[in-house]
Structures are given as C-alpha cells and as structure tokens.
C-alpha cells in the first residue's frame, strides 16, 4: 500500500509527477524535494523571452498556495537529496534529515557542463537555472559584448537574444558544423546560416584555449591564437544527468538512470522521469535519454502513475520532439536524426522542411517555421509510414502552400 510518495527534483518532470499523482486520486502524503530555492519554473523561456530587454516573463508554473494548498504537497525547496538507501527506502537530505518513501520518482534533470578553471572569473556563465538567466540578462542589459561557447540550441538562442538587442556576439563551435548530433551535418549547416544572416559571427572548428581577465572576463583566446573581446561568456556545451547523489544506491546509472519502458529502475518503488531518465522507448526499440520539454513533462506524469500503481503500469513511448527559437524563426524536430538519408523537401525564404529516412521508413523531420506540419510528421513516424508515402505527403503540403 502506498502512503507516501516522494518526488526528488522540483522542476518540470517533478511537478507533473505530483500533479498526476493527485489527479489519479492519490490522497496520501506527497513531498517534493528540490535543490533550488525557487518554486518549479519553466526553463525554455530562460534562453528566449527572459533575455529580451522587455519586462521578463513569469516563469513559475504554479504559486505556493496552489502547491501547498490545492495539491497538498509538502515542499522541501533549497535542499538537495544527498543519498538513497533503497533497502530501507530512505532518502538523505543535505541538512541531515531523512525522508522515507513507499514510492519515489527521481526527476533531478541535468546540470550544465562548465568550462574547467573558469569558476573564479566574473562574467562567465552557463544557462540552466533561473539564477543563471538573471545574471546573463543583467549583463545584456549592460550592453555586453557576448561570446557563446558551443553552437547548440541554447547557445544559439542566447546569440539570437543578444542580436535582438543589437549587441555584438560571437559563437564558437569546436566541430566543423553545429548541431551534427541533433539534426545531422547538412541540416546543422543549413541552420547555421541563420546566425550569419542575422549578424552573429560564427566560428566553427575553433577550440577555446583559455579565458583571460583580471577578476572579470575580458578575452577568449582560441587555439589558433585569435583573441576575442568579451564582457559576457556563456558556456553552452551541454548538460550531464544529475545522478551524483545516487552513488552507492545500487541504481543502474549509464548516461542517466537506466529504466525499463515503464520508467521503472528495476528497484522496488523507484521510478525516474525527465532529463535524468534513460528509458527504453518501445516505439524505437531502444533506450533514449532526451533533454526535451515535452517528454520530461509526459514522463513525470507517467512515472508517478506507474509508481503509485505498479500492477497497472503502462509503458511510456514517444516520438521525440523539441523546438528552438532563433531570430524570430521556430525550428522544430521530431523523431531521430540517425538516418540513412536526409531529403530537403522545401527550402524557400524562411521555410524549410527536411525528412529523415531510416531503411524504408520515415524516421525524423525537421522544419523551420513549419508549425502546421510538424506534428503531422510525428504522427507518420508513430504509424511507421513508408518513406515514399511520407515524401509524397510532405511534397503535397509544400506545393499546396506554394500555390495558396
Ligand atoms: C535554457 C533552457 C532552454 C530550453 N529550451 C527548450 C526548448 O526550447 N525546447 C525543448 O524541448 N526543451 C528545452 N529545454 C529543455 C527542457 O527545459 C528540459 O528538458 C526540462 O527542463 C527537463 O525537466 P526535468 O524536470 O527533467 O529536469 P530539470 O528541469 O533539469 O530539473 C531538475 C531539477 O532537479 C533539481 N535537482 C537536481 N539534483 C537534485 C538533488 N540531488 N536533490 C534535489 N533536487 C535536485 C535541479 O535543481 C532542478 O531544479 C531547455 C532547457 C534550458 C535549460
């Protein structure tokens, strides 16, 4: 019998877990533990509207009254979980207290990679948390000359935000093309054009040798000796799953917490969700760890329902989906970028549609400003649509637009 649900990680997946628990009729005790002081908040705006020179948007999902009152959630914020004993079902907290659980959902997400040896330099940031975003916003407000290290989605959004304010920005990417892992080489290079067209200096195949400055960052020195002046350096070199606190717990950790298709860790009562979960996605027949908003939200809800009612557990499967906003355009991707072939169906003005083929099936789709189409491609991937049919469908959508 489950009396006590504990959710560790008070962000998107953790919040959706407690909401789903109450929605399913669970009336036992729920405790939500989060290492940040803040109430659960939304991260995507942090690299978008939050960086604008207008009033920043509210990013909290729910207020404290709703969480403590309506949802009857005990909040333990500003306190990290530091250990887990799965035999006695006890979680250790940083302040020395212990929490017992009948069911546990781990939703500790991921933490941003930092550049070693740069912690003491003022003006060097990663962007993962609201506190990071506030510091970056303040630097942009002061008219910073920005260098972004890493041309991934978050780094690119920051560059876009700086350009929107008319500020100079350089993006440095170690690989010859940005976003190879996310969308493949050809499409990575196509998207990189957006930087150039919008006045961002993009330097690919460039290594960062060191950052220089007297207390505050002043220069980024590249491996070829080039020196770039910077008041603000944002390091966007990816994130790692937040699993350090689980050392010694016996849970299997391999690029996140290894879970089955029900988001179950294999240890009684313990489930995982969101960016920290490396789960078996039945739709693709393999394990995946995603760092996408939509899957984190859905997994949080799914993990809580399964944790509270393991006998009726339902697999969580999905077509991965993410979006990113650059220079007023929306990039969207569904499926998997691992492809035998990528075919551009449409590339006109500010619109792009590209399909990804694996074997004789559609495996992925990338669009630029294709909001009306992207979920249709997701549906085709779910239905394991044959490649020829998918191409014909995409072509018909594009030609209908061209003649409209
Ligand atoms: C700036 C930014 C922009 C993004 N934009 C997009 C976008 O445009 N589209 C998209 O699809 N996705 C986007 N994402 C990704 C999306 O926000 C994440 O996939 C989502 O936040 C994952 O939610 P989560 O709850 O799994 O993990 P997280 O949001 O990482 O939250 C985990 C929480 O757990 C806490 N925690 C960690 N360890 C402990 C511990 N030991 N004890 C207690 N608490 C702990 C952390 O402090 C954190 O608050 C963006 C992410 C960022 C950072």
Image (cartoon, rainbow, N blue to C red):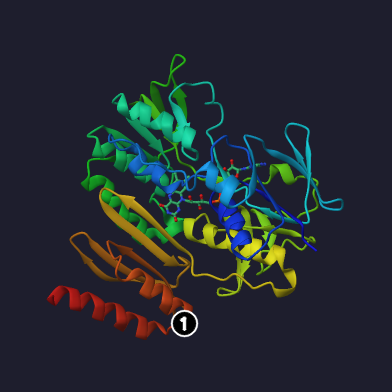
Residue 233: x percent and y percent?
41, 30
Q: Quadrant of the C terminus?
A: bottom left
Residue shown at 39% from the left, 49% from the top: 176
Foreground residue, 73 or 232?
A: 73
Residue 195: x percent and y percent?
28, 46
Residue at the extreme left: 403
Identify the image quadrant of residue 136: top left
Residue shown at 45% from the left, 83% from the top: 360
* In this picture, residue 205 sits left or right of residue 241: left
Q: Is residue 386 above or below residue 178?
A: below
- Neighbourhood count class around disc 1 (C-alpha, 10 Å): few under 14, some 14–19, many 20 upward: few
Judging by the rendered image, the residue that carries numbered circle 1 is 383
* In this picture, residue 138 sits left or right of residue 249: left
Residue at the extreme top: 214
Residue shown at 54% from the left, 43% from the top: 65
Asked whether the viewer can see residue 203, the reply is: no
Foreground residue, 73 or 78?
A: 73
Q: Is residue 105 above or below residue 140?
A: below
Q: Quadrant of the N terminus?
A: bottom right
Residue 388: x percent and y percent?
36, 85
Check mark 1 vs ligand 1: CB closer than 8 Å? yes or no.
no
Element carrying mark 1: loop
Residue shown at 56% from the left, 26% from the top: 117
Asked whether the viewer can see residue 49, the reply is: yes
* In this picture, residue 308 sits left or right of residue 344: right
């Amino acid at each position: 019998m489950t009396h006590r649900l504990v959710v560790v990680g008070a962000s998107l997946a953790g919040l959706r877990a407690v909401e789903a628990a109450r929605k399913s009729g669970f009336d036992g005790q729920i405790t939500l533990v989060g290492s940040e002081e803040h109430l659960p908040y939304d991260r995507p705006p942090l690299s978008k509207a939050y960086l604008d020179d207008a009033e920043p948007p509210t990013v909290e999902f729910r207020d404290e009254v709703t969480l403590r009152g309506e949802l009857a959630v005990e909040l333990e914020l500003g306190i990290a979980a530091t250990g887990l004993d799965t035999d006695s079902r006890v979680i250790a907290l940083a302040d020395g207290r212990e929490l017992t659980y009948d069911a546990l959902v781990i939703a500790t997400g991921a933490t941003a990679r930092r550049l070693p040896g740069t912690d003491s330099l003022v003006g060097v940031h990663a962007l993962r948390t609201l506190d990071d975003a506030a510091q970056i916003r303040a630097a942009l407000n002061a008219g910073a000359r920005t260098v972004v290290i890493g041309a991934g989605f978050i780094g690119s959004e920051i560059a876009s935000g700086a350009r929107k304010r008319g500020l100079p920005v350089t993006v440095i990417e170690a690989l010859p093309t940005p976003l190879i892992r996310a969308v493949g080489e050809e499409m990575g290079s196509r998207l990189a054009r957006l930087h150039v067209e919008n006045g961002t200096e993009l330097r690919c195949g460039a290594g960062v040798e060191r950052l220089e400055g007297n207390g505050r960052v002043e220069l980024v020195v590249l491996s070829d000796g080039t020196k770039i002046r910077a008041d603000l350096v944002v390091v966007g070199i990816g994130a790692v799953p937040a699993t350090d606190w689980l050392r010694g717990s016996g849970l299997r950790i391999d690029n996140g917490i290894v879970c089955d298709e029900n988001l179950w860790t294999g240890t009684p009562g313990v489930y995982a969700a969101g960016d920290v979960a490396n789960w078996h996605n039945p739709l693709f027949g393999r394990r995946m760890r995603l760092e996408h908003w939509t899957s984190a939200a859905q997994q949080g809800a799914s993990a809580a329902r399964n944790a509270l009612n393991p006998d009726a557990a339902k697999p969580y499967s999905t077509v991965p989906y993410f979006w990113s906003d650059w220079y007023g355009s929306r990039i969207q991707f569904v499926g998997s970028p691992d492809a035998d072939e990528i075919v551009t169906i449409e590339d006109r003005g500010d619109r792009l549609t590209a399909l990804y083929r694996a074997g004789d099936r559609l495996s992925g789709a990338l669009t630029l400003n294709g909001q009306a189409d992207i979920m249709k491609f997701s549906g085709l991937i779910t239905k394991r649509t044959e490649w020829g049919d998918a191409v014909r469908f995409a072509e018909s959508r594009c030609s209908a637009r061209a003649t409209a």
